[in-house]
Image: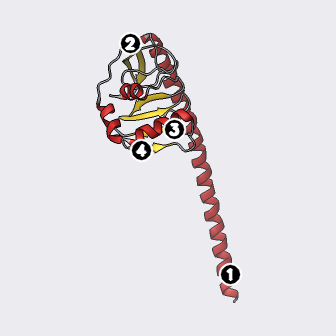
Amino acid sequence: MGWKAVRDFLEITQPHIQISMSKGNLQIGSGYIHDIMVFAPDGTLIRTTKGFCSGELFRIHKALTESPEQLAELLARKDVFSRSIPVYTYQDGEIVEAYCEELGEDSVTHDGQIMNDMSHFADKKAALARAMKSVDSGIANFQASLIDLERRVVECREGIDRQIAEKAELERLLGEFHESH
């Protein structure tokens, strides 16, 4: 995967700088914005969030954009980890086992996912409970959205009917106008 090789190469030790992988791309960011910089596997910069001018992020951006070939080589490396602690997360109705070097907020799994206390768990049962809560919340949100959409459909149909009635009245007035002139 190579994200750890990039982190080690750049000597990033500050906990507020996060390196992770998403959809095969390298993301560099913070606990709040995970994708301040996004790089493709070939080392090319996909996007940068404007205004990220922190000294450390600027240094990282400069180092990675100066040599896309070197970044691609780092990303192609197989990462080596000192420990493999199992953690559990959920995705698409499945409980997924991943591994990390250390448990805790803002750690990263071996496959490059940023962990937090709402997404990754040392206990499989806790992951399942959180997944159920998340799905229940999703269902409730979609139901509320559907109710709102159904209300909007009724409002739109009523609006169309009013406009058709107004158009008919205007056409009647236009006909009277033509007859009198």
Does the CB distance between marks 2 and 4 fall below 8 Å? no
Q: Earlier in the sequence, mark 3 or mark 2?
A: 3
Does the CB distance between marks 1 and 4 fall below 8 Å? no
Mark 1 Cα-neighbour bin, 10 Å: few <14, some 14–19, many ≥20 = few
Mark 2 vs mark 4: in front: 4
Does the CB distance between marks 3 and 2 fall below 8 Å? no
Q: Residue at x 55, y 35 (%)?
A: 55
Mark 3 Cα-neighbour bin, 10 Å: few <14, some 14–19, many ≥20 = few
Q: Please indicate, yes or no, whether residue 42 appears anywhere in the rendered image.
A: no
The residue to which callout 1 is attached is 176
Is 137 on the left or on the right of 108, as rendered?
right
Say what amino acid the circle numbered 3 marks.
Phe
Mark 3 vs mark 4: in front: 3
The residue to which callout 3 is attached is 58
Which percent across, then down, holds residue 178?
66, 85
Q: Earlier in the sequence, mark 1 or mark 4?
A: 4
Relative vertical location of residue 157 with respect to residue 20 in this rendering, above or below: below
Q: Quadrant of residue 143?
A: top right
Is 101 on the left or on the right of 171, as rendered?
left
Q: Report the disc number at residue 86.
A: 2
Q: Which of marks 1 and 3 is nearer the N terminus?
A: 3
The alpha-carbon separation of the residues under discs 3 and 4 comes to: 16 Å
Relative vertical location of residue 145 with respect to residue 12 in this rendering, above or below: below
The alpha-carbon separation of the residues under discs 2 and 4 comes to: 32 Å
Q: Which of marks 2 and 1 is nearer the N terminus?
A: 2
Colour scheme: secondary structure
The residue to which callout 4 is attached is 46
Q: Report the disc number at residue 161.
A: none
Does the CB distance between marks 3 and 4 fall below 8 Å? no
Residue ranking furthest to the bottom = 181
Is 75 on the left or on the right of 130, as rendered?
left
Q: Which of 16 and 148 is in front in this view?
A: 16
